[in-house]
Amino acid sequence: MKYTVINLAGILNSNLSESLRSQVDKISIEPSCLLIDFSKVTKLEDSAFASFKYVLQKMNSLGANRIAFSSINPEFQIKLARLVDFEINSFPDKYSAKSFLEEFHSKTKKFEALSSLENKYQKVSEFIKKGDIFYINCPNCSIKLRIRSSGNHACPSCKSRFFFQPTLSQGDSKPTEEPVSSVAFGTEYKMLNLD
């Protein structure tokens, strides 16, 4: 996921908002998140609202929680909230906004990675649990296997691969959530200054 921070400065009018609009068009070509910082904005003109509505709708069309604002004037935030029918994520500083975007989208990536493993390999959910060991049968050759965690596994006998995810209704305790180690979760920020 590409992360971009746009630092706005000066008077927000139709000229600056058109520049913002063109930057968002470039950013939205590939999956990305956007943080818009208002800490150096001195004045907000009504002519900027049409472009901000476009920016909000464009980023929301890419997926939920793709845009966050930092250091925004509360009055301007209320006006922006009236333009769209979804929640606007606003934070007191850049650090809080970055943390929100990173946390939300890293959880989404982990969920997508687990879903792709489930779809790629045959899923096994029936088991017997003794202590911290799960006993399952290989979906291909039916040999009994001992497994310590959920995730992607291979049968040592027939070499077939499968995905094991215990269901809560069968075990006597919740399965522990394992981090997905095969997917790299890095964050790279690109800074743009508009003034």
Image: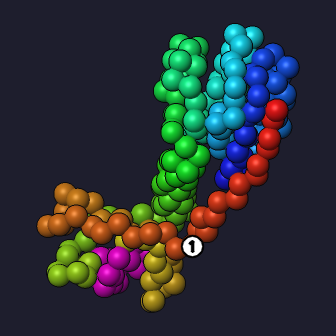
- Residue in view at x 58 percent, y 30 percent: 72
Looking at this view, is 95 or 114 the one in front? 95
Q: Quadrant of residue 150?
A: bottom left
Looking at this view, is 161 or 129 the one in front? 129
Residue at the outermost left position: 172
Q: Is residue 109 magenta?
A: no
- Residue 18 at x, y = what percent? 83, 22
Is residue 101 visible from the viewing direction of this image? no
Residues shaded magenta: 135-149
Please say if 137 is above or below 183: below
Please say if 139 is above or below 145: above
| Residue 27 located left or right of residue 101 | right
Is residue 104 visible from the viewing direction of this image? yes
| Residue 10 located left or right of residue 117 | right
Q: Secondary structure at mark 1?
A: loop
Q: What residue sits right under mark 1 in the picture?
A: 182
- Residue 167 at x, y = what percent? 27, 60
| Residue 58 located left or right of residue 97 | right
Looking at this view, is 66 or 13 the one in front? 13
Quadrant the C terminus occupies: top right
- Residue in view at x 76 percent, y 28 percent: 10
Q: Amino acid at mark 1?
A: Ser
- Residue 186 at x, y = what percent? 63, 64
